[in-house]
Amino acid sequence: MEEGRRINIGILGATGTVGQRFITLLSKHPWFIIHKLGASPRSAGKIYPKAANWKQATPIPSAVRQMVVHECKPDNFTDCAIVFSGLDADVAGDIEAAFRAADIALFSNAKNYRRDPHVPLIVPLVNPSHLSIIAQQRALHSPPLSKGFIVTNANCSTTGIVIPLAALEKAFGPLEQLLVTTMQAISGAGYPGVSSLDILDNIVPFISGEEEKIEWETLKILGGVVDDDRGLKSFDMHARHPLRVSAACNRVPVIDGHTATVSVRFAQRPPPSPQQVREALAAFTTDAQSLGCPSAPVHTISVHEEPDRPQPRLDRYYQEGAGVSVGRVRQCPVLDIKFVVLANNVSIGAATSSIINAELAVVKGVVQA
Ligand SMILES: NC(=O)C1=CN([C@@H]2O[C@H](COP(=O)(O)OP(=O)(O)OC[C@H]3O[C@@H](n4cnc5c(N)ncnc54)[C@H](OP(=O)(O)O)[C@@H]3O)[C@@H](O)[C@H]2O)C=CC1
Ligand SMILES: N[C@@H](CC(=O)OP(=O)(O)O)C(=O)O
């Protein structure tokens, strides 16, 4: 990025849980400047503090205190080079498609386009190389686009899990089997989310669609991008080394921070030892960091030796919520290795990932700054 230049950005769903996180992070961003805010017709026309039910620990940033919230229509955002979406999935599909059709670069948190064969599903600390499919997404759009595209980030639980898995595949080669059990925070359900009478003194062993998302998204993210005979790119879904994934998801009475217990089997025989796994996790570095993305964690995975870590209350702000914490790395008597991972669902699980994805797109020249 050119010294002193800042890029105008817009935020859709700016009043919601993820939208508020975008505002907090982007109000102090060195490259991006918040230029437009969007939310539902209920909020449109109001100044931001009147539209949002602000739930962050820090006050509403001065940069947006006088901003008027707009309807999420592309015409209101034409002077934004990048638009972030924290839209409710019920409305994200049509709105995000309209922004792409208006030739606007859009980075979404919503699930709607994650399975699209031309849309990259990017966890920025894992698979930024998938940005390579954007040229094809633009070319196949009718009419072809010069600037517009959609990039999605992953489900918040999937994000926390694939980061240590990517570190393991980088060090030891492909994984073959994966068993995951999540303990997911209430904030993952947005605001006001799960009712207190359902979640206090309780665990709810069902989150609609979540297990299917972890089982499918993990393959798209950890798999490669391949070219066919005609030069068309597609996602290989880890097909060269099939990976079987089983997830079980639970809602627990924690406000922020999704925890997961993970057991893996490696293709490599004999498998790595717990100590080799700890060393590989701690040594993991990312392109986002080496390419100078300002929101990338300086150190990606914190590996705990203490037997009772990670814990949401103690570890969810590791690297300002952009890194993940792993602990209890040990032998698994059924598969090979098991461990616990904790990721901040509203930071690296949502807004932070989108922001690093946009930073990567700027660095790689996919977004013209
Ligand atoms: N919370 C989390 O941890 C994660 C969430 N996500 C995904 O991010 C997205 C946002 O989640 P979250 O912030 O929790 O949701 P919220 O319910 O808190 O916020 C939803 C946002 O969508 C806006 N909206 C609702 N209806 C419309 C409409 N008709 N037109 C335009 N805007 C509308 C709301 O505006 P208004 O206030 O005006 O109603 C609000 O800004 C979802 O798709 C979610 O699945 C992804 C990963 C993690
Ligand atoms: N379903 C997740 C949050 C979420 O919104 O996921 P997704 O973006 O995949 O719909 C949770 O409840 O914790």
Image: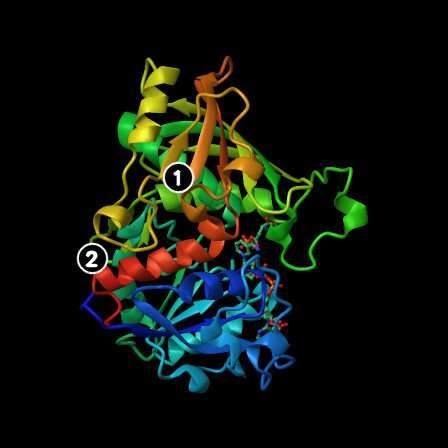
- Regarding residue 20, the answer to whether it shows in the image is yes
Dividing the picture into quadrants, the one containing residue 25 is bottom left
Residue at left offset 55%, top offset 23%: 308
Type of amino acid at the residue the image marks with label 1:
Ile
Q: Position of residue 333 (x, y in %)?
A: 50, 12
Mark 1: give few (<14), some (14-19) or many (20+) Cα within 10 Å: many
Labels 1 and 2: the sequence-earlier one? 1
- Which quarter shows the C terminus? bottom left
Type of amino acid at the residue the image marks with label 2:
Gly
**Residue 163: assigned label:** 1
Residue at left offset 39%, top offset 17%: 274
Q: Position of residue 246 (x, y in %)?
A: 54, 33
Q: Is residue 369 above or below residue 238?
A: below
Q: Position of residue 348 (x, y in %)?
A: 44, 49
Residue at left offset 34%, top offset 46%: 297
Q: Is residue 147 above or below residue 304?
A: below
At numbered mark 2, what does the secondary structure look like: helix, strand or loop? Answer: loop
Taking depth in this image into account, of 153 and 196 the one nearest to the observer is 196
Of marks 1 and 2, the one in the foreground: 1
Determine the CA span between mark 1 and mark 2. Answer: 30 Å
User: Is 363 displayed left or right of 168 in the figure?
Assistant: left
**Residue 257: assigned label:** none
Tell me which image quadrant ligand 1 sits in.
bottom right
Taking depth in this image into account, of 153 and 360 the one nearest to the observer is 360
Taking depth in this image into account, of 198 and 24 the one nearest to the observer is 24
